C-alpha cells in the first residue's frame, strides 16, 4: 500500500491529500454477526443496529459527490452504505479508474465542524509519520450542508497523540460531574464533548432507576483526583463495532479516528470490556482486559473509565429514544460496577 504526501492541496470545496494517487486496499467490513469459525471477536456484536443514524446512499446530496469528485479528480460512484455505527454516514464508493474507498459525509453540526474534520486529518497524518498503519485520508471537504472525508482502511495502534485532545481528563469530568477548573486544570473540549457532558448531567431526571445508578457512579468517583498526564494515543470510539474490521476471523484494521486523541489506552480497553457482557463466552476475555486496565491506571482510574462508559451508553440510549434498551444498560452498568468492586 502506497502512502500519500502529507501536504494538503486545496481543490474546489475540499482538500486533496498529496500530489499522487493512493492505492486503496479494499478490506471487508465485519458483519454484525461475524464469528468466523469457532473464534469469537469483540467486533462481531453490535448493541442495536437499528440505532444507526447515517444517511443512506440515496439520501446523499448530489453536490457532495460532485465536491468529492472535484477534489480527488475522479468520478465517484456510491456502491453501498457500510453497516454499523451510531454516527453512520460511511459509504463504500468507487473511484473511476482506481480502487474502492470509504466516504463519510455527515450534515454540518456546528460552525467548527469542518475544522474538527481537518484536525482528524492532522491526527491521521501524524500517526502515519510515526509509522502507525492508520487510514490514509484521500480528501476532506464541505458543502453548504455536509462535511465529508474520503479515506482508506488500515490498522490503528497505540502511541503518543499529536493534538491536545485529552480523553483521560474528559472521562474524569464526565464521571465526577466536576469541571477541571475546580482542580486548577485547563481543558479543551470540542462542541460535541461539551454537549455530551451536559447531557450526561441531566440523566438523573430520566427515571428513579437511572438516577440511582448515576448516584452510585458519582459516589464511586467522588474522591478520585483528576489525571495529571495523558501518555497514550487512544481511539476513543471503539464503541462502534463497525470501526473494527475483521478478515478471516482476525482484526485487520481499526478505522474512524476522527475522535482520537491523548489519554490512556485503558480508555479503549474499557470500551471493549463493555461489549464482552453481550456473550458469556467472552467472560474470560473480560477478566484479562480488566486485569490489564488495573495494571495501567489502578482501581480508581478504572472506576472513572467504567463510570464514563456507563454514563455515555445511558446518554446515547436516552437521546436516541431507545427506551426499550435503557433497562438493559442499567443492569449491565450495575454488573460492571459489581465486578470492578470485586477486584478492589
Image: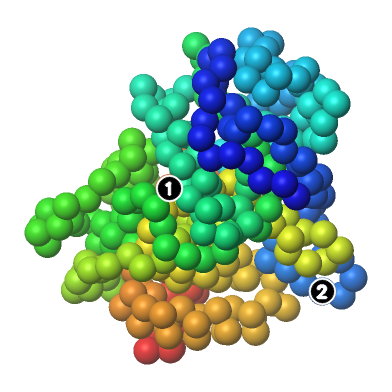
Residue 234, horizontal then vertical, whole percent: 47, 60
Q: Secondary structure at mark 2?
A: loop
Closer to the eye: label 2 or 1:
2
**Label drawn at residue 315:** 1
Q: Is residue 284 visible?
A: yes
Residue 118, horizontal then vertical, whole percent: 46, 34
Seen at 72% across and 46% down, the residue is 2
Q: Is residue 106 above or below residue 324?
A: above
Seen at 81% across and 45% down, the residue is 26
State the count of labels: 2
Q: Which residue is mark 2?
A: 39
- Left/right placement of residue 182 relative to residue 161 reads left
Toward the viewer: 300 or 99?
Answer: 99
**Label drawn at residue 190:** none
Toward the viewer: 81 or 65?
Answer: 65
Toward the viewer: 167 or 287?
Answer: 167
Amino acid at each position: 500500500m502506497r502512502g500519500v504526501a502529507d501536504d494538503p492541496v486545496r481543490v474546489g470545496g475540499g482538500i486533496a491529500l498529496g500530489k499522487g494517487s493512493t492505492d486503496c486496499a479494499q478490506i471487508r467490513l465485519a458483519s454484525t454477526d461475524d464469528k468466523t469459525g469457532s473464534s469469537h471477536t469483540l467486533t462481531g456484536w453490535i448493541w442495536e443496529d437499528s440505532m444507526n443514524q447515517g444517511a443512506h446512499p440515496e439520501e446523499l446530496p448530489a453536490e457532495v459527490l460532485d465536491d468529492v469528485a472535484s477534489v480527488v479528480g475522479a468520478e465517484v460512484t456510491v456502491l453501498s452504505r457500510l453497516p454499523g455505527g451510531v454516527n453512520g454516514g460511511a459509504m463504500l464508493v468507487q473511484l473511476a479508474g482506481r480502487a474502492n474507498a470509504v466516504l463519510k459525509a455527515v450534515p454540518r453540526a456546528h460552525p467548527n465542524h469542518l475544522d474538527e474534520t481537518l484536525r482528524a486529518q492532522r491526527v491521521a497524518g501524524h500517526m502515519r509519520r510515526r509509522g502507525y498503519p492508520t487510514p490514509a485520508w484521500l480528501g476532506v471537504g464541505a458543502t453548504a450542508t455536509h462535511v465529508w472525508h474520503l479515506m482508506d482502511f488500515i490498522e490503528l495502534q497505540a502511541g503518543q497523540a499529536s493534538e491536545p485532545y485529552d480523553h483521560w481528563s474528559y472521562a474524569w469530568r464526565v464521571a465526577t460531574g466536576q469541571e477541571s477548573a475546580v482542580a486548577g486544570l485547563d481543558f479543551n473540549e470540542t462542541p460535541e464533548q461539551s454537549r455530551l457532558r451536559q447531557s450526561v448531567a441531566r440523566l438523573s431526571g430520566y427515571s428513579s432507576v437511572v438516577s440511582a445508578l448515576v448516584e452510585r457512579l458519582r459516589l464511586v468517583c467522588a474522591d478520585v483526583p483528576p489525571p495529571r498526564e495523558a501518555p497514550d494515543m487512544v481511539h476513543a470510539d471503539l464503541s462502534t463495532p463497525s470501526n473494527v474490521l475483521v478478515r478471516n476471523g482476525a482484526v485487520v484494521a481499526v478505522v474512524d479516528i476522527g475522535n482520537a486523541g491523548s489519554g490512556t489506552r485503558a480508555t479503549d480497553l474499557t470500551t471493549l470490556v463493555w461489549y464482552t457482557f453481550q456473550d458469556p463466552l467472552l467472560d474470560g476475555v473480560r477478566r484479562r482486559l480488566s486485569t490489564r486496565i488495573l495494571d495501567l491506571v489502578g482501581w480508581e482510574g478504572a472506576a472513572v473509565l467504567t463510570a464514563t462508559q456507563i454514563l455515555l451508553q445511558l446518554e446515547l440510549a436516552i437521546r436516541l429514544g431507545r427506551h426499550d434498551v435503557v433497562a438493559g444498560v442499567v443492569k449491565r452498568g450495575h454488573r460492571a460496577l459489581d465486578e470492578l468492586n470485586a477486584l478492589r
